[in-house]
Amino acid sequence: MRKPNHHWLKSAGLAAALGVSLLAGAMERAERISGFAAEASRAQQALEEKLKAIPSSEELRKQHRHFTAEPHPAGSERNNELARTIAERWREYGWEDVQLHRYDVLSSFPREVVVEMVSPVAYRASLREDAYEVDPDTSNPRVSGGYLGFSASGEVTAPLVYAHSGNPEDYAVLRQHGIDVRGKIVIVRYSVPYSYRGFKALTAEREGAAGIIIYSDPAEDGHGKGKVFPEGPWGPESHIQRGAITYDFIVPGDPLTPGWASVEGAERIPVHEAQSVPKIIAVPLSWRDAKPLLENLDGPEAPKQWQGGLPLKYRLGGERVRVHLKVDMDTSPRANYVVEARLRGAEFPDEWIVMGNHRDAWEFGGVDAASGSAAMMELTRALGELKRTGWRPKRTIVVCSWDGEEVALTASTEWGEQFADELRQKAVAYINVDPGVSGPDFDPAAVPSLAPLLVEISRDLADPSGKTLYAGWKETVTRARKGKTPKDADLVNTRIGSGSDHTVFLNHLGVPAILIGFDGPYGVYHSVYDNFFWMNQFGDPGYRTHRLLTQLWGVLALRLAEADVLPYDFAFYGERVRQFVEEIARRKGVRDNLDLKPLLGRVAEFRRAGEQLRRAVEKALAAGPLDPALRERLNRHLIAVERNWLNPDGLPGRPWFQHVLYGTRYTYGHLELPGLTEAVEREDWPAAAAQVRILESALARNASLLARAHREMTNER
Ligand SMILES: [Zn+2]
């Protein structure tokens, strides 16, 4: 669901302000891998070499074709058939406990969608995308027309107003021009940087609009960027960005079971009580379908920044153009399936490395998310081959193919809610791949405790040009920052929003999350052109980046599954939290209304405890293997740290979101220290002070947990 954005373009300034590189020690190809004793390191490296040799680009291309052969939205027969074939493959590959979990969830399929201009001229939008002879998939009769998941059903005829990106500040501009959108239909653009379309819908709903049209302006993902499909990777004139507008930033998953699993017999709330179901009629348009509407708008000329990539004067409208919208959605419940399989751990079966990717797609899902599904299948084949040689992971590896991600992060949320107690006990980390490959640029995100691990691993992998992944990655970031070389500590994005299946793990269950994928020029997101042809022409001809993704995903899973001591870096976590707090300290009104010194003191205490423990662990591992009982106790403590960031009361107004360091904005944008940040933005100082106390106590809990782990280590050795 999430559209890739290069984080370092946005955060370059902030990242440069961080003065330390905690990762400097990991520069050279290590004698010893973080978390492993010397002998275990050598065995691990040999195991990783074996794994890396297995994935094949040819096999990945075949897998990719399998997933992209037909449209397969959540709840469709084709998507369920894919679930069954995944389960079959996993059994063949030697995976264990293969099962399908079924969730019957509120769904949203179009029966009828109409967009027409009734005056000043009659015109009806096609809501279809052009077929191209070079790409037979584009003429597949099972491709749907344009619609938005969870649009309200209804019908309205009203004047049209252009509201730019459809953000609250855009409506303020309209008000300055004396334009009231109440009862009218607004037309807004998909925007860069990405802002979730559901937030545009909610904003229009709150402003009192009767309907919303969201169109793809060529300035953002079409010819304004470069060559368009089928000559280039950008969106052609008729491409439509489908998508859901579900308000899953309030609570994700099945709208009728907020906070619990949609299993058989579960209580369901009535639809009108569901907070995540929009009440506004919404439709997506290609720019070709939108152009006649925009051309006919009257009213004041739109501000300069509002002018788009079409050869016309963008006006605010409001009188002349009248539009008729009709949307009729079938919302009857449908089955969503999670396919789950495991390799049971030989030594620590109750410590789980969970990994997943969503299977459902708006149409063929070439990038989103079949590129990730192909890598997941090839990785499970590779791990299965290792198992056939007699190997078994020390910890349990759990793999899941999610469903309904595109609709409301649905099935991963339901699965996470169903197994919440067990996951809070056992999950070591969750590795998510959504758009696996849309180009060659590595752009991962992770909680800070696992960010250094990604950098360390990147030195042990080769990119398609033969450089290390680390070197290629650094070059990409340097280029994006116009020649400014990043520090290692700034390579991994540690600002994680929502918009994909990591959400339930990180924000609801307190499981450390890692998101991996490769980006590039990509203007066909959620359109029919996001397909096999696109991938072979533009995204990854030869599937060599897919191969790298598979290897990376595998090495990451193996490091976590095999480590003597789980390679979390809490000193680095502390450093990042300090940065988050200092950003808050600089915000308007904070100096006069909040005392953040005690909080910064707690952060420093946590960071010091992390540093002290890291040193002790490294020293101990350098000296040889740890005592097994000590090691087991230590890992239990380490796993508990992320869980301690949960506040069972949740965010004010969004109780499902329980993590005190990570939340999400309604745009899916990242939101650090969410409770505190939102209170500061509201200038509600008593609420902000209460949030500071919540943070202080979480930090104190974790500092004393790490100190205790350190004591146990130093006493018993
Ligand atoms: Zn996706």
Image (cartoon, grey):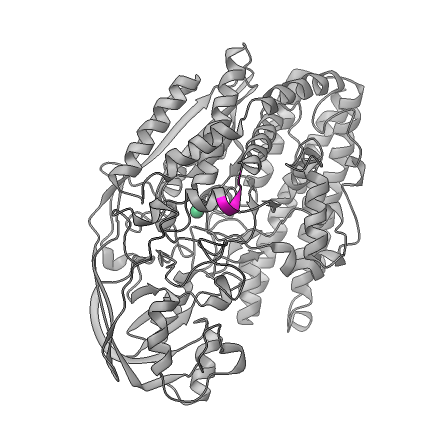
Q: Classify 428 as above or below 159.
A: above
Along the line of sight, which residue is nearer the eye, 686 or 190?
190
Q: Classify 489 as above or below 400.
A: below
Q: Residue at x 22, y 74 (%)?
A: 156
Q: Classify 302 as above or below 596.
A: below
Q: Which residues are magenta?
A: 537-541
Along the line of sight, which residue is nearer the eye, 635 or 346?
346
Is residue 359 found inside the magenta-colored segment of the image? no
Residue 184 placement (x, y as % from top left): 30, 79
Along the line of sight, which residue is nearer the eye, 65 or 193?
65
Magenta part mainly helix, strand or loop?
Answer: helix
Whether residue 84 sits left or right of residue 178 in the image: it is left
Q: Is residue 278 visible?
A: yes
Along the line of sight, which residue is nearer the eye, 100 or 582?
100
Whether residue 122 sits left or right of residue 510 in the image: it is left
Residue 46, quarter of the rendered image? top right
Q: Residue at x 35, y 22 (%)?
A: 88
Quadrant occupied by the C terminus: top right
Q: Classify 89 as above or below 693.
A: above
Residue 122, quarter of the rendered image? bottom left
Whether residue 194 sits left or right of residue 639 in the image: it is left
Residue 517 placement (x, y as % from top left): 55, 43
Residue 513, quarter of the rendered image? top right
Q: Residue at x 27, y 52 (%)?
A: 144
Whether residue 707 sits left or right of residue 136 in the image: it is right
Residue 295 placement (x, y as % from top left): 37, 80
Is residue 539 found inside the magenta-colored segment of the image? yes
